[in-house]
Amino acid sequence: MKRKRILLPHKFQVIGWGMFSLAVMLLLFILLRYEWNTSHENTFLPLVDQYSRYVTSLLLVLAYGSAFFVAFSEEKQEDELVREIRFSSVTIVAAVLFALMILFSLLAALSQGFRLNFFTDQNYLVMHWISNILFAFFIYVIVFRVRLFIIKRRLKNEE
Amino acid sequence: MKNNIRVERAIKKITQQDLADLCGVSRQTINAIETERFVPSTVLALKIARVFEKTVNDLFILEDE
């Protein structure tokens, strides 16, 4: 019985990690440049020259592309145990992020409703990150990799 | 769900890796099934049964809740 293929072949994962490395290098380059050039008002990406938009676009393409390729490509030996870990990881991450969003929304509502003002801008920034799809992908990749590593290591030495 | 894959493997004198290769999965998956950490799909259960020339019911025993 042929199984319907949903994920990309394993080689895309290698491409994804390559893109991720490039994204990290580009980010480091931007951060280093930020320290040298402090006389600007751009708070997100500090490149003030005419290339800043291109660099920002390139960084976003690399970040989203690498997340997509790494998250949606098969392992070297993709069998049903790996698939089980993959799908349960997606469920865990989605449930935890949704729970956090509910908690933060509740705290924000309480803070505003009772005029307690304990919900600061930083809390809203955290909420923004939790609802960011790139962040969710990132957390999913970490959870999946860690669980896969633990389970495979646990099963490696048993015969 | 219990299973006696380990016993059948010992009778047939094949390793986890041999069984994994015959079924097209990783050795860890066979290990996880033997140690009852993972319940295989119907397809994999049938493949394992075919290797041992047994029925799925001979290999996998459904326990009472």
Image (cartoon, grey):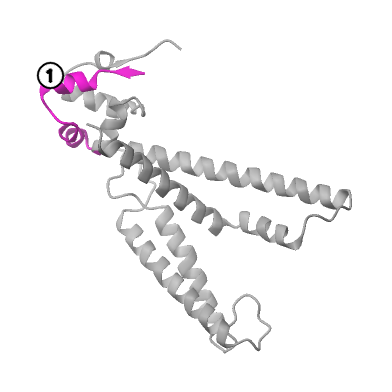
Name the dominant secondary structure of the magenta segment: helix
User: In the image, is residue B8 part of the stretch drawn in magenta?
Assistant: yes
Q: Is residue B25 visible?
A: no
The image shows residue A94, relative to residue B5, as above or below, that is below
Could you tell whether A97 is left or right of A113 in the image?
A: left
Residue A32 image point, x, y percent:
51, 81
Q: Which residue is mark 1?
A: B11
Query: Residue B41 or A39: which is nearer the viewer?
Result: A39
Q: Residue at x 19, y 32 (%)?
A: B16
The image shows residue B38, relative to residue A136, as above or below, that is above
Query: Residue B61 or B57: which is nearer the viewer?
Result: B61
Residue A65 image point, x, y percent:
45, 64
Label 1's element?
A: helix
Could you tell whether A84 is left or right of B27 in the image?
A: right
Q: Residue at x 56, y 44 (%)?
A: A94
Question: What span is colored magenta in the figure?
Answer: B1-26
User: In the image, is residue B20 part of the stretch drawn in magenta?
Assistant: yes
Q: Residue at x 52, y 41 (%)?
A: A92
Q: How many marks?
A: 1
Q: Is residue A116 visible?
A: yes
Query: Residue A156 or B30: which is nearer the viewer?
Result: A156
**Please, what is the three-letter code of the amino acid marked with disc 1?**
Ile
